Structure formats: C-alpha cells, structure tokens
C-alpha cells in the first residue's frame, strides 16, 4: 500500500488550493482536506487507484460542491457584502514565501462568486489549476462536451478577465504603499489621486462589526468614506504591509489583534486603484498572524 504520509505530503497543498478556491474560506477548506485524508487513510485498496491525483481532486471537489450549495443559501441572509477569507502572509519566513507562491488572487476569488457551484468547479480546475477538459470531465461526472459548455458559460458570466494567480508588479506595490501611508498619517490626498473615477470599495463586517452594507462606488464617495472613517479613528493602532493572496496589501492591528485586512484590484491600463476590498469580519481574520 502507498505510504499515507507521503501521499499527504505530496497532495495536501494541491487539494487545499482546490478547496480554498471553491469555498473562499480557510477553515472550511481545512475541514474538507481533513475529511478527504481521513477517508483515504481507511481506504484498503488505494494501490488500485489508477490516477491518485484525479481521484483526490474528485473527492475534494465533490465535498466542496456540497458545502458550497448550502453556503450559498446561508449567504442570502448574510449581513452586508460577503467577501472571501484572505490569505495573509508576511515577508520574512520560508513558509510565507511558499504560501505566496501558491496563492490565487483575491480579486479572482471575489469574481468567482458570480458562478454557480458547478461552473466554479470547472472554471477553477481549468483556469487556475490548468486541467484539461479530459481531466475535468470525470471529476464532475460530465462528458467532455458538457464540460466545455460549462466552462464557456462561466466565461460569459464573468465581466472581467482577472488572472487566477496574483500579478506581482510595481503598480500594485505602489497602490498598497499609498494606502499604507494614508492610513498611517490620516492624509488621503495622495491616495485619492490614485483612484479611478469609477472605483468601488467593498467591505465585509459580517454583522459582527460596522461596515458599509452596500459597495461604495465612485471616486468622490470612496474618498469621502475613507476620510470620514479615518477622522473617527478607524485606522488607529499599528499598520503593516503584508502579502494578501500573493499581492501587497495592508494589515491593521489594534491591541494585538487583527482589525482590518485591505487589498486592491488595480486597473491594468491606467495604473490606478479600481477596487478596494476591506475585511473586518473577525471570524475571517482569525487565521491572520500578527507581526
């Protein structure tokens, strides 16, 4: 029989990537991976599995589909905007460098919520993990032709062509640095100059802390919102540069606890901030390690 520890070591990161992209939460992804390996450990005929990677991908995808279908119902009564749980890492440890290298961009995760659970599975396997249609079809128990149609339908639903993996660039770093400076000093003039006219700010408090219930749209309104909350002490505490899903972002820590994680989607053609994502929900910040 194949060595279970070796299988775990070789495939855990790959399966976590599927689960996290499917579910958008670290805790749920870890629970799925735990269940998959628990079942695998008690499977007597593992050596008879012809393609172990595809077999594990199918197990993980099926569990995620079941969870995602029930999660979509829960999100219908969620207070305010629902955003994925960010993967936050620091710059100075080997483990964080590995996480950054395997990251999927935050804007990509947000965009995936436009898709149905099955469309999301196909799109992730094809776009982010680069599976062939032949490989995806048995995982979702569809024909290759149907798999292609599902992928095509998913592409039509998505309004933007956002890369699955983070694009490291000086542009994103500059945008993050500008926000870092503004939040630290309370002076937002320089940052406001970097906003597109149709910039969107989305915040997720989950009903646990105060946050904007609806997205805030336009340069004027976003500027007024940021200036207003800053004047009320919303950025008190320590402000740190961090990596958020493989791109530079901002972490606010207050009294030793993570208070906000902020990241951005840049406008590729204009070099400006197109979208600001602010995570405030404490349930989605519990995996964040403070400096």
Image (cartoon, helix red, strand yellow):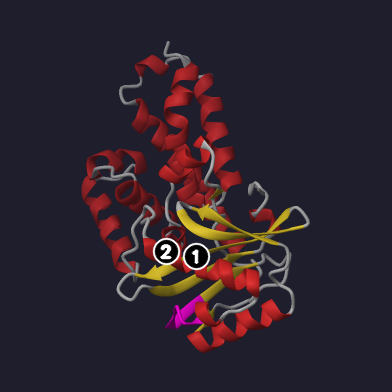
- Quadrant containing the N terminus is top left
The foreground one among 8 and 103 is: 103
The foreground one among 44 and 178 is: 178
Total number of numbered discs in the rendering = 2
The disc label shown at residue 8, or none: none
For disc 1, the marked residue is 176
Tell whether 87 sits left or right of 171.
right
For disc 2, the marked residue is 172
Q: At 37% from the left edge and 50% from the top edge, which residue is drawn?
A: 124
What whole-number distance in Å separates the C-alpha atoms at marks 2 and 1? Answer: 6 Å
Looking at the rendered structure, the secondary structure element under dot 2 is helix
Q: At 47% from the left edge and 58% from the top edge, which residue is drawn?
A: 106
In the image, which residues are magenta?
Answer: 192-200
Residue 59 coordinates in the image, percent (x, y) = 44, 35
Q: Residues within 10 Å of mark 1 (few under 14, many from 20)?
A: many
Is residue 80 something one can see in this rendering?
A: no
Residue 62 coordinates in the image, percent (x, y) = 45, 41
Q: Residues within 10 Å of mark 2 (few under 14, many from 20)?
A: many
Q: At 48% from the left edge and 44% from the top edge, which residue is drawn?
A: 19
């Amino acid at each position: 029989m194949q060595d279970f520890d070796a299988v775990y070591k070789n495939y855990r990161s790959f399966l976590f990537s599927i689960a996290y992209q499917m579910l958008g939460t670290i805790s749920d992804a870890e629970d799925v991976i735990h269940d998959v390996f628990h079942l695998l450990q008690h499977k007597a005929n593992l050596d008879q599995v012809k393609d172990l990677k595809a077999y594990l991908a199918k197990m993980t995808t099926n569990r995620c589909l079941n969870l995602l279908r029930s999660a979509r119902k829960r999100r219908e009564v969620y207070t305010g905007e629902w955003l994925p749980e960010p993967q936050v890492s620091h710059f100075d440890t080997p483990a964080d460098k590995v996480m950054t290298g395997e990251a999927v961009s935050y804007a990509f995760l947000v965009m995936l919520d436009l898709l149905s659970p099955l469309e999301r599975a196909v799109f992730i396997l094809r776009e982010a993990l680069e599976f062939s249609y032949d490989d995806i079809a048995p995982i979702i128990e569809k024909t290759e032709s149907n798999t292609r149609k599902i992928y095509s339908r998913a592409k039509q639903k998505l309004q933007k062509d956002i890369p699955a993996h983070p694009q490291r660039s000086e542009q994103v770093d500059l945008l993050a640095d500008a926000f870092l400076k503004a939040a630290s000093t309370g002076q937002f003039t320089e940052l406001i100059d970097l906003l597109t006219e149709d910039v969107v700010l989305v915040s997720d408090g989950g009903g646990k802390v105060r946050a904007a219930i609806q997205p805030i749209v336009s340069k004027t309104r976003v500027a007024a919102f940021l200036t207003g909350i800053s004047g009320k002490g919303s950025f008190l505490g320590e402000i740190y540069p961090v990596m958020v899903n493989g791109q530079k972002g901002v972490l606010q820590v207050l009294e030793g606890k993570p208070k906000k994680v902020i990241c951005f989607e840049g406008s590729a053609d204009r070099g400006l901030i197109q979208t600001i994502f602010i995570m405030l929900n404490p349930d989605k910040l519990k995996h964040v390690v403070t400096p």
